[in-house]
Amino acid sequence: MTLDAVVFDFDGLILDTEWAIYESALAAFAAHGHTLTTEAWSTIIGTNSEEDGSWWDTVCAAAGVHDFDQHLFDAAYATSDRSIRDRLPANPGVLELLTALTAAGVPLGIASSSSRAWLDHHISRLELTKHFATLVGADVVGGVGKPAPDVYLRACADLDADPARSVALEDSAHGATAAKAAGMAVVAVPTRLTIHNDFTHVDLVVPSLRDLTVERLAALMDGSMNGRVDPP
């Protein structure tokens, strides 16, 4: 079966912005005497917190924190220095995989719960623009983030690709759920945060993008390369 397209998540997969965000959240919790574990924070990774107000209750419940006013968190979070995100390099294996897929003529896109402006900024900064035919942020589809499938469906439509013949690359369970709901095959690349997520619903788990090739992704279309590789 033909590989119509490969659609990448962004935060955590292409760029390790999630860890910097977690560290800022950790500091904001600590400023008010609360603990925030990586496992608790991982419960909301991949979603659009700007549109989905339930994220706060979810993460507080996972952290076992009660009566912590979100406004106090927001104020403390706003004081953190997150400028490191503009100095982060692309994750290992990103450029090599993009180069191989582009050379093979596979259409590529990004589907993210972040904004289109965020994607434009970092993809341009990393000099990866030439590889992607479409960048779909949640704001492009009316603010609907993952785990809804909207960003993946839009990316496939922009690429003129059949989701059933396309592969999504994800680092979070919420993102994988979105891609599966769109009808795509999914490869998970867990991070040091999302290693806590449940990826039993994906087609393949690998430790790094360096473990993927054009041939391995294409093989997912006929089921000959399904399997799991536990990340370290």
Image (cartoon, grey):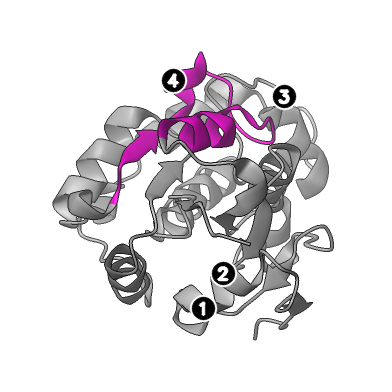
Dot 4 amino acid type: Asp
Q: Report the magenta residues as a range.
A: 132-158
Residue at screen point 56% across, 70% down: 217
Quarter of the figure with residue 37: bottom right
Q: Are marks 4 and 2 in contact (CB under 8 Å)?
A: no
Q: Earlier in the sequence, mark 2 or mark 3?
A: 3
Residue 57: x percent and y percent?
Answer: 76, 29
**Residue 134 vertical position relative to residue 20 in the rendered view, above or below:** above
Quarter location, residue 109 = top left
Check disc 3 and report its element: helix, strand or loop.
loop
Q: Which residue is mark 4?
A: 139
Q: Inspect this view and state whether residue 48 appears.
A: no
Q: Label 3: few (<14), some or many (≥20) within 10 Å?
A: few
Q: Horizontal and vertical percent for residue 107?
A: 38, 51
Q: Which residue is mark 2?
A: 218
The label shown at residue 215 is 1
Of labels 4 and 3, earlier in sequence is 3
Q: Residues within 10 Å of mark 2 (few under 14, many from 20)?
A: many
Q: Amino acid under label 2?
A: Ala
> Which element is circle 1 on?
helix
- Please report contact status of discs 1 and 2: CB closer than 8 Å, yes or no: yes
Disc 3 residue type?
Ser
Residue 122 horizontal side relative to residue 109, left or right: left
Disc marking residue 53? none
**Would you say the residues marked 1 and 4 are in contact, meaning their CB atoms lie under 8 Å apart?**
no
Which numbered marker is on residue 54?
3
Tell me which numbered mark, 4 or 2, is placed earlier along the sequence.
Answer: 4
Residue drawn at x 49%, y 50% as measured from the top left: 9
